[in-house]
Amino acid sequence: MSNSKTLIGPGVSVALVPCPALGDTTVFLRLAWRLQAAGAKVSLASASLASIREYLPGLEIVGGKPDVAGLAERNDLVICAIDWQVDAPLSNVAYLAGKKLPRAFKPEQQPVSLFGHQIPGAHNVICRDPKAGKSMVQWIDLYAEQILGVDLAQPIAGLQAMPVPPVDAERRVAIFPTTPHASKNFSPSGFRRLVRRLAARGWLVEIVGIPPERQALVAQYPDCSVQAFDDLKGLVDFLRTCSVVISNDSGGGHLGSLMGLRTFTITRRRTDFTWRPGFNELNCVVNPVLSFKWLGKTVWRPFIPLRRIVQALPDWKGRPA
């Protein structure tokens, strides 16, 4: 543990600046709760989190494009995703990357200090060993503990004062069939097969995307209700009506896990890949039983064992609604 052990506590102000991606934002939110539990005054510069301020008591949410230099002036410490790196070195700004800092970035030339004490390792990657089997949630906890000296035994707040789930939430499943990266997406035909099998067992299945995708998703899933939300609050409120999230390797799975839902992540990666939902123990990674290279591409989608998802969930058919 670093010599920063006693530096994070009551009276210390820390600003966090996550990158815009939803999954990354949830990981920084975890760090915010860790710092909050240590007694620090914590702010998050995030346009997406601005819509759920009411669910984040005790955290200051700063919307709009992050002003890293301004945050550095107003706070004792800033922990910033490398996506928002500014040209001028700032002595109280630490940069985090998911797995790799830019080659041109020289951490040793930009030491980070808090109250005159240098914080070794403040500039870092969240995942320091992709083969270790840890999730990004576990890695960010280690950063909080080993670099910032935070006590992980302290309970964290989590989302608060959310809507009461409806009576049918237990049998509703949300499927997120898309990501910004087509190579990560399971096939629409595969998701349609999954929808039919779940519906046959009495599940209420909803397809979830972003507003620009809605028309295409309605065409691809003509027998399903399709949901798309203009802000994060709409999505969070909707997921309160669900008990299960099925997704590709995407932000929807991370948000579902953060909210305590059961999640299934469909991916071609190994089951312990780093960027998997890890906020609770109810995540299952579903990967292909085999894959192979063909014309320079990996063929994996036909070999996803959908039965693993279907058999893991209750059969609601014939039960009272």
Image: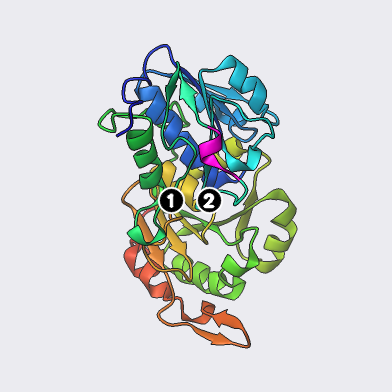
Q: Which of 217 and 56 is in front in this view?
A: 56
Q: Where is residue 156 in the image (x, y as percent from the top left)?
A: 35, 29
Element type where label 1 sits in the image = loop
315 vs 258, left or right, is left
- Classify the position of the N terminus by image quarter: top left
What residue did someone put label 2 on?
Answer: 252
Identify the residue at the far top of this view.
Answer: 11
Q: Which of marks 2 and 1 is nearer the N terminus?
A: 1
What residue did someone put label 1 on?
Answer: 127
**Quadrant of the image occupied by residue 293:** bottom right
**Vertical side of 312 occupied by 279: above or below:** above
Magenta span: 105-110
302 vs 136, left or right, is right
Q: Position of residue 280 (x, y in %)?
A: 34, 46
Q: Where is residue 226 in the image (x, y as percent from the top left)?
A: 63, 55
Can see residue 168?
A: no
**Vertical side of 110 occupied by 214: above or below:** below
